Amino acid sequence: MAKIKKTSIFLSIILVILLTISATYYIGFYPKTEVIDINTSSNLNGFELLDRLSKNDLNLSSKEISLETSLTLSEEDLSSMFIGLIKDSNNKLSNLITGLKVDITENKLNVIFHLKYNGIPLEGHLVFNASAINSKCVLHYDSGNIGFININKDLIFSKLRSNDVVTFDKTNGDIILSISNIDNIKIKDITVQDHNIIITIKGSLTLDDLKKLKLN
């Protein structure tokens, strides 16, 4: 009788442990958010950004084009940007991540991503603050986690590679959005409205600048 009781207690303890592990996995780690498949085509590139600028009001003269306009990036645009970064990384990271999406709240970008580690589906979050610093659009890495496991910025930035849309300041944990390769175009301000990031841009393009664009 005592042996049966001990066995029952042992099985109860095992059951509680299994239920605790299952609950912890489901609450903290199991993917619950709908994301965009990582194999989706990424259409956000430098030419696309310049094309959007060209659709705004410009002041023309015989010597230059001056502008003070805005560029709107939606959550879908930023999701496409991060998907492009993952694909361009060409390393183990791109093989692990299965999808992601960007949610914009206030001045924060919450990058929700799904990955499979040893066949186990997991959901993680990366948080970036958007701001205009030194006439550039900067996404500063604030925090990241998979469940209760924190993600260090060095782990993230060591895996990413620059492309024609973004460059990195890996020391400070910054993603820097490249509007163009023309020095005269500056970021004046960044605001968030209706889940969009609105980048106010000021600058001018001379004839020499236009020639550079054509060559590139």
Image: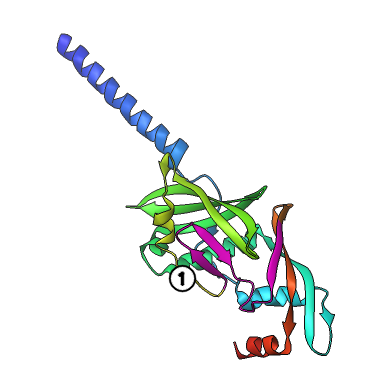
What kind of residue is marked 1? Answer: Asp
Q: Of 180 and 149, which appears nearest the observer?
A: 180
The structure residue drawn at horizontal position 63% and vertical position 88%, both measured from the top left corner, is 212
Q: Quadrant of residue 16?
A: top left
> Where residue 104 sits in the image (x, y, percent)?
64, 51
Span colored in magenta? 165-190
Secondary structure under the numbered disc 1 in the rendered image: helix
**Is residue 205 in sight in this rendering?**
yes
**Residue 180: in magenta span:** yes
> Where residue 20 sits in the image (x, y, percent)?
37, 29
Q: Of 70 and 131, which appears nearest the observer?
A: 131
**Is residue 198 in sight in this rendering?**
no
**The C terminus, quarter of image:** bottom right
Q: Quadrant of residue 45?
A: bottom right
Residue 99, compared with residue 165, is above or below; it is above
Residue 57, compared with residue 159, is above or below; it is below
Query: Which residue lies under the disc numbered 1?
Result: 88
The structure residue drawn at horizontal position 63% and vertical position 63%, both measured from the top left corner, is 134
**Residue 118: in magenta span:** no
> Where residue 14 sits in the image (x, y, percent)?
27, 26
Residue 101, compared with residue 27, is above or below; it is below
Q: Of 197 and 117, which appears nearest the observer?
A: 197
